[in-house]
Amino acid sequence: MNISVNSKKNTFHLYNDEISYIMTVLPNGQMGQLYFGARIHEREDYSYLLEMKSRPMTACISEEDKLFSMEHIRQEYGVFGATDYRMPAVEIQQENGSRLSEFLYDHYRIENGKPSLSGLPATYTENDREARTLVIILKDPVMQIRLELFYTIFEKGGIITRSARFVNEGVNEIHLASAMSICMDLPDSDYDWIQFSGAWARERYPVTRHLTPGIQSVGSLRGHSSHNHNPFVILKRPAADEFQGEAIGFSLIYSGNFLARAEVDSYGTTRFTMGIHPEWFNWKLSPEETFQTPEAVMVYTDKGLNHLSQTFHRLYRERLARGYWRDRERPILINNWEATYFDFNEEKLLQIAQKAKDCGVELFVLDDGWFGQRNGEHAGLGDWFANKEKLPEGIIGLSEKIEDMGMMFGLWFEPEMVNIDSDLYREHPDWIIQTPGRKTSHGRFQYVLDFSRKEVVDRIYGMMSKLLSDAKISYVKWDMNRSITECYSASLPADRQGEVYHRYILGVYNLYERLTSRFPHVLFESCASGGGRFDPGLLYYAPQGWTSDDTDAVERLKIQYGTSYCYPVSCMGSHVSVTPNHQLSRVTPLHTRANVAYFGTFGYELDLNKLTEEEQNEVRKQVLFMKKYRRLIQFGTFYRLQSPFENNVAGWMVVSDDKKEAIVGRYKLLNGANQPFERMYLKGLDENTKYLVNGNETHYGDELMHCGMVTTDASAGEAGPDEKMSCDFDSELYVIHAV
Ligand code: DGJ
């Protein structure tokens, strides 16, 4: 990995074994983009990549040069207004009303490793040899604003991270109306755009369309990254698929309002921009102040979408997630939410915990309803002390009893919210986000605390840290169950109201940072009505997240499959719940519920006392299975094999780094009569190694990958003597060991 600088040509080339990223200073002093893709040779001169052409109806920068128009030049951080008509990376409102800016190259510096981003989550290195960072420093001579563009190349993987920092070196205040994290101009537009969209209980379904002239975008204006669109987009060549071909993934390490946008211009080039959503964003930058954008991560591959995902998985698992739990197998938990909802007392909880303990479960999580007057959705949020009617000995007493059983204890919070019926609201009705003179909307009867205010965050920190210090709490589920509306902060002046959404998220990050550093051994799981804030920003603080409120196995198959395009298995909260399922009323076999939930952090969301003796024994076996294989599942290499969005039979697998172990999950949606023969083509094995499949047959890796593993079930005909009849939503796991 290196960064080479050609100072004669003012060209910068970041490269490692897989990729090259090349840019140059343009004749007018702005930064031009030359290439991002597979590694290419180092050359003296790449200026041929700077395509310019005289075209009618083109405004040119100077009368001396009829070719030079920013309209036709690929740039690193485009601005609108001076011959470039595309959507910009930056827009700055100045005191005289002008919005024009011009950032000219000043100098560069190279740092070993990767600097952290103040107050923001970001990927990191553990030593300076893992990555190098190029900082290009540009200046706007009129505003005297310094712009620093950060580019980090990692030693391994086709990864470039980017962010921008603005420093006001002038004497006037300015307003950043748009400051994207990344602007990437690609030379053509022959790409399929894949976004990950959905809604509550059906998050992150892949949606694909070919890029067309004009603008296509996804984003969120809900104050959180949202169930609706994830801050992750892939541009892939139409011929690329899971196992071959070119693709670029763009991921934003941010949990608030975001925009991902591709603009295809009339000449077929594509400008991709991603960052904080400019709508309702307006950041006042006074002299000497700085503004740091969130980080965007770009991954290039020419080996297909699985390889793209695996690069994100490793990076996010090892160099975004942090702390004690980062590399540790995740405890198998039982959560009481779907077992009791708000209707519980200590006795009931202890019964649930005891049965779970008998079945081998390691962590008991008490969900919503344990605090204040929280007997339903109308009251209690904000009062983070135990409801003594339900828990006479409080959280301290309950946590000790759970620990005495030999289990860890975990607790649910929703730190950012308040009910009107709460002591906190009665004391501080002015602490919620609301616009003066306007109605304030509720969501689930709750209101959003103004986390842009330090005193609000401090108060919540005080309540949470007291509990975490006093009681034996090993795990926190941090929930967030509504979007922001009527966004306005009573603590900020009129000309800073455009900062509220971003300051809110900075407040969330601040609370996470303080809690995770003071309680480093506590495992945090993020949640937002399921997957409403399932993004890389929170992965920095919480190494796992509740993937979706939908616990139905068939729906989860799709949700986890879609989520896996960017996020590693180790971060996907996944539980076995009861049937009929509470979200869909669907009945699925217990083994299928587990076979899906294994590919995540694994746990149960039901009262095991209510299962039959036979089912409880099955649960015991499931827990033993997960304990045996969770290192492989959570930290192995994950492959999507067959999509549940396109096939009746879906499949995925994990393979250990040494290729000696693998587990394949095969999932059938509907059963059918007299079905075709079926094989699953495995991946990632060693061609020359002999593997034992489910303790029965042995096959070489090349057979399993090229001939395929035969998975035909009884529905292809009559059930044979040793065969069980298949059913709807049936599934099978194949455990594969090298012999
Ligand atoms: C939404 C979460 O996603 C659920 O798991 C549960 O914690 C409820 N909130 C509790 O209110």
Image (tube, grey):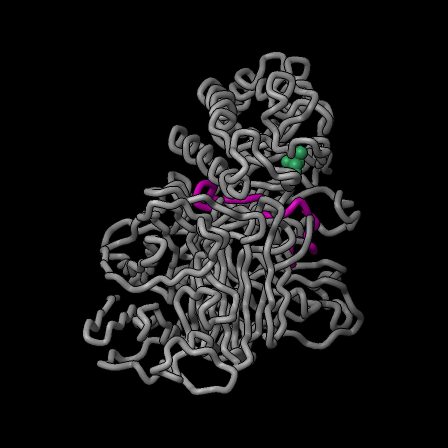
Residue 232 on the magenta span: no
Query: Residue 30's x, y, as percent?
Result: 34, 68
Query: Residue 123's x, y, as percent?
Result: 38, 51
Q: Is residue 471 left or right of residue 204?
A: left
The quadrant in which residue 530 appears is top right
Where's the N terminus, which quadrant?
Answer: bottom left
Q: Is residue 8 left or right of residue 241?
A: left
Q: Is 240 situated above or below 499?
A: below
Determine the quadrant in which ligand 1 lies.
Answer: top right
Residue 544 on the magenta span: yes
Of 622 and 122, the residue lying toward us: 122
Which residue does the image show at 62% across and 70% down from the upper left?
Answer: 208
Which residue does the image show at 70% across and 56% down from the upper left?
Answer: 554
Q: Is residue 367 left or right of residue 524?
A: right
> In the image, which residues are magenta?
539-558
Which residue does the image show at 29% across and 62% down from the upper left?
Answer: 155
Q: Is residue 164 visible?
A: yes
